Image (cartoon, rainbow, N blue to C red):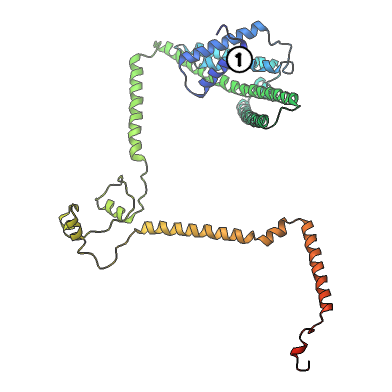
Amino acid sequence: MDELPLPALFEQAQKIHQRATDSVCDQDVVRKGCQALAKCEDMIGKLGLFSTNETKEDISTTNLKYILVPYYLGEMIEKIAQNDRIQILKASQAKLKEFLSFCEAMELTPKDELETSAQAGPNAFVDQRARKIARFKRQRAAESKLLEIKERKERRGRSTRAAALSTPVEAGEEELLDDDGEEEREAWLTAISLAICKAFDLLEMLKKEEEMLSAVKERQLKEGEKEFSQAVLDERIKKAEAWHRDAAVRALYTKAAQPITCATFAQDVLEGRAQVSQAHEHKHQPMIFGPASLVGGGLTSERERMAAQVFQPHHRLPTMSIEEAGLKEMEIMNKWQERNMKLMEEANSAWHKDNKKLGPSEEDDEDDDAAVEKARRWDDWKDDNPRGAGNKKLTPCG
């Protein structure tokens, strides 16, 4: 870790922070992330990347991401498991306050947060609720904006790779680089704005937790109990495990069973011949008459099978149940509706209607000229061949 440069060390620390935020990590990983972030903070101070005389416009795009180091460190410290929880809370709050004060100096903190934090009066609860609502809206907007920037960058990367494979490199790469720089700066500023919202919420939560732990500690000191005994903790663990175990057992009985849709199977359940939990495929089994049915055993030989088919009912046995017939009819009706929809679409999209809708005006003009030319040729033919000119021999007076 000592040999890594600042960008590589920050990237490693950011990956550990993301991993710890998304899921529960081992304490060794959390402590390693804290060490990496502390090393980043030390290197930033030695390099003098930031100054109190600067604003966010004076900070370069490559150095914007290092503003998040105190925030990441405050979140990682809060995840450390230690007996003295109050000291962990104080250290985490110190880093978060350092991050918020630096953002305020860089003019990155929203004005309404500064105004509402300075106000105190009878309407404190109303102001606090309004502040939380506005902060939640800013957080949602920042998250959606980061997602949009990520998707836009992925789309541009795919299009750039496709263009590089299909066409040679052309002029205009500087503009793309400028766009990438502006987009990266916008992404980091949005990430800092999101971190500010989360830092305010986390700071309030840590303050409340510290107050509760301090009150519990004071009460224990007054009562003479400096710490909980191990026996009490073991008893509480056993009670919690027993409660979860009983809840898992109750869930098996409280879970709704699958509805019974077969009338024959429902009658068997009511009369005690079958259980609800048994699998049933709703298939009709034909009745078998003959010696095998009287004995109640299975058909073990060809002779018994033929003997069982001797005495059969005079009517035809059903090949499916009522439920299966209904499902079959429903399937036929769905296919019939789909076919009618296709026929209606074909009727509405006839070739003569499509030609009228899609045909250009020039084709209409050509069709009109052809019709006029045909009518003129027909008039000329009628002038050369008067009516009845070829039928004179068929007339009586011809």
Give x and y (percent) for residue 273.
24, 51
Quarter residue 349 falls in: bottom right
At mark 1, the secondary structure is helix
Give x and y (percent) for residue 368.
80, 64
Give x and y (percent) for residue 225.
39, 11
Q: Considering only vertical position in the picture, is 310 above or below 190?
A: below
Residue positioned most to the bottom: 397
Disc 1 target residue: 69
Residue occupying the point 20% across, 64% down: 311
Residue occupying the point 49% across, 57% down: 335
Q: Is residue 381 visible?
A: yes
**Left or right: 63 with respect to 282?**
right
Q: Quadrant of the C terminus?
A: bottom right
Quarter residue 156 falls in: top right
Q: Quadrant of the N terminus?
A: top right
Kind of residue indicated by mark 1: Val
Residue occupying the point 60% across, 59% down: 346
Identify which residue, 172 or 34, lies in the foreground.
172
Identify which residue, 194 or 391, lies in the foreground.
391
Identify which residue, 138 or 131, lies in the foreground.
138
Q: Is residue 116 visible?
A: no
Residue positioned most to the front: 393
